[in-house]
């Protein structure tokens, strides 16, 4: 009886080991939508444009957009369409003032907290729009800070 128990225990352990090894060999690569898209080396490209990052605004798909400023403090939306194609758009209102504008519409944003990560900039129909969504509400703004119902 004792021999059968030991054999069953060994068989059970072997099965667990095989199942565990089999699971680890399955493909677990990320697919679209699994993680934020941030192009490799984008900070070097910012430096080559003589810009300093103010705030990254990653999303799950291209293009990657960040807010950056030049030596004079002028802010730009930097749109990374691809490694070869990077566009800069002068921002009429600073990132910080957009945050204040969204707060003035009744949303809660605290700089340096996850709530700030709910602010994105999207390129829709070849135009840039700010978007903030926190699960309680959703707001779109033009680059000038004007609230719009939908950019679509």
Image (cartoon, grey):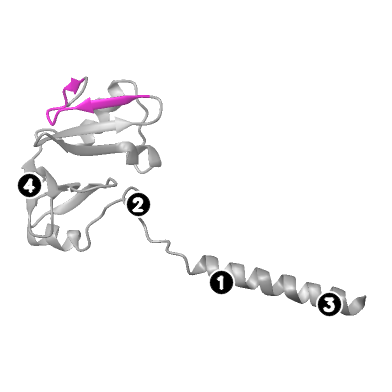
Mark 3 closeness class: few <14, some 14–19, many ≥20 residues within 10 Å? few
The image shows residue 91, relative to residue 11, as above or below, that is above
Residue that carries the numbered disc 2 in the rendered image = 35
Q: Nearer the viewer, residue 13 or 56?
A: 13
Residue that carries the numbered disc 4 in the rendered image = 88
The segment highlighted magenta reads 137-148
Q: What residue is shown at x 40% (from left), y 29% (from top)?
A: 135
Find residue 99 and report its image quarter. top left
- What secondary structure is marked by label 1? helix
Q: Is residue 138 magenta?
A: yes
Q: Marks 1 and 2: which is nearer the front?
A: 1
Pick out the residue farthest to the bottom. Answer: 3
Q: Marks 4 and 1: which is nearer the front?
A: 1
**Callouts 2 and 3 close, C-beta under 8 Å:** no
Residue that carries the numbered disc 1 in the rendered image = 21
- What secondary structure is marked by label 2? loop
Q: Marks 2 and 4: which is nearer the front?
A: 2
Q: What residue is shown at x 8% (from left), y 37% (from top)?
A: 126
């Amino acid at each position: 009886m004792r021999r059968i128990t030991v054999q069953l225990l060994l068989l059970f352990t072997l099965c667990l080991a095989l199942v565990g090894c089999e699971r680890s060999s399955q493909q677990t690569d990320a697919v679209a939508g699994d993680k934020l898209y941030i192009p490799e080396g984008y900070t070097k490209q910012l430096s080559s444009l003589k810009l300093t990052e103010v705030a990254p605004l990653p999303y799950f798909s291209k293009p990657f957009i960040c807010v950056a400023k030049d030596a004079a403090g002028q802010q730009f939306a930097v749109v990374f369409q691809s490694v070869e194609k990077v566009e800069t758009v002068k921002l009429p209102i600073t990132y910080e003032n957009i945050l204040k504008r969204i707060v003035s519409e009744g949303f809660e944003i605290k700089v340096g907290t996850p709530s700030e990560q709910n602010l994105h900039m999207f390129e829709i129909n070849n135009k840039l729009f700010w978007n903030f969504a926190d699960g309680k509400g959703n707001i779109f703004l033009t680059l000038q800070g004007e609230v719009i119902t939908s950019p679509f």
